Image: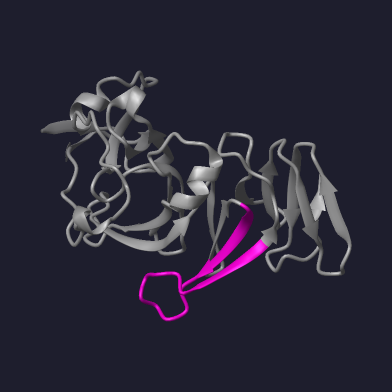
Amino acid sequence: MTVKRKCNTRLILACILAGLAGNLSWWTLMAGGKEQPAQRGQRSGAGVDAANQPGLPTPAGSHGPDIAAARFVLPEGFVIEQVAGPPLVRYPLFACFDDIGRLYVAEGTGQSVPGAELVKLGLGRITRLEDTDGDGTFDTSTLFADGLVFPQGVLWHDGVVYVASHPAIWRLEDTDGDGRADRRDEFIARFNFNGNGCDIHGPILGPDGRLYWTDGRHGYKIERPDGTLLEGLASRIWRCRSDGSELERL
């Protein structure tokens, strides 16, 4: 199908859930520039075998990118295009780019169960997507990290991927270049958890070069590198340096 594209600059990546679009996928919102013809549609995902992604249920109710896109109401001058969907990703929640345009996607579990069950299942994952031919659509998916409880945020910074997943902010690193995180460290811990939206989310990189994240109302007990203890129940915004020093609750 041929559509009119009114730009060539990606502004926003949005995660569309099944209840809204009938298809769990990543979309790119675009605006401005000169009209030009463009081919619309999702690639099949070269190099990806959905059967090799154990534990995750298959999303139901997928209607395809064209039907789902028709449900969006966009401002004048904007278009929206799907850039990734199953089998490249299944339950996308958050995403961030690295310095060469690869997209790291924090994927949920597809399960609506109590937090204690999520801990046992360990179905959360970080998937890395690549556009290998430069056509603006991701075509390759690599499982960067699995066995996470419930990833609720992801940040690539200076060669390291940070993710909030109970009971900690994790630091993930691929040290041998094979596309998988072979080093996994609890970066800041521990936060309490029950599997709902009041858990830890983040981190993001602030303009001051520090990492910022939020925590809900389930409580925390964290020992700083200097031995002092931070403990409480109230919701907080947190920050620290990328090496974990100067940890603060704001």
- Does residue 219 lie above or below 17 as drawn? below
Which quadrant does the N terminus fall into?
Answer: top left
Residue pictured at 29% horizontal, 19% vertical? 71
Q: Position of residue 73 (x, y in %)?
A: 35, 18
Residue 156 inside the magenta-drawn segment: no
Picture mark count: 0
- Does residue 152 lie above or below 46 as drawn? above
Q: Looking at the image, what colour scheme do you see? A: one colour
Which of the two residues, 183 or 82, is positioned nearer the viewer here?
183
Q: Position of residue 110 (x, y in %)?
A: 38, 39
Residue 77 image-quadrant placement:
top left
Write down the region rendered in magenta: 167-187
Residue 90 image-quadrant placement:
top left
Is any part of residue 83 visible from this angle?
yes
- Does residue 155 lie above or below 218 as drawn? below
Is any part of residue 150 visible from this angle?
no
Q: Position of residue 164 (x, y in %)?
A: 58, 51
Residue 231 lies left or right of residue 182; in this view the side is: right
Residue pictured at 72% horizontal, 65% vertical? 244
Which quadrant does the C terminus fall into?
Answer: top right
Residue 79 lies left or right of residue 235; in this view the side is: left
Residue pictured at 69% horizontal, 42% vertical? 215
Residue pictured at 63% horizontal, 44% vertical? 200
Residue 41 image-quadrant placement:
top left
Q: Residue furthest bottom?
A: 176
Residue 185 inside the magenta-drawn segment: yes
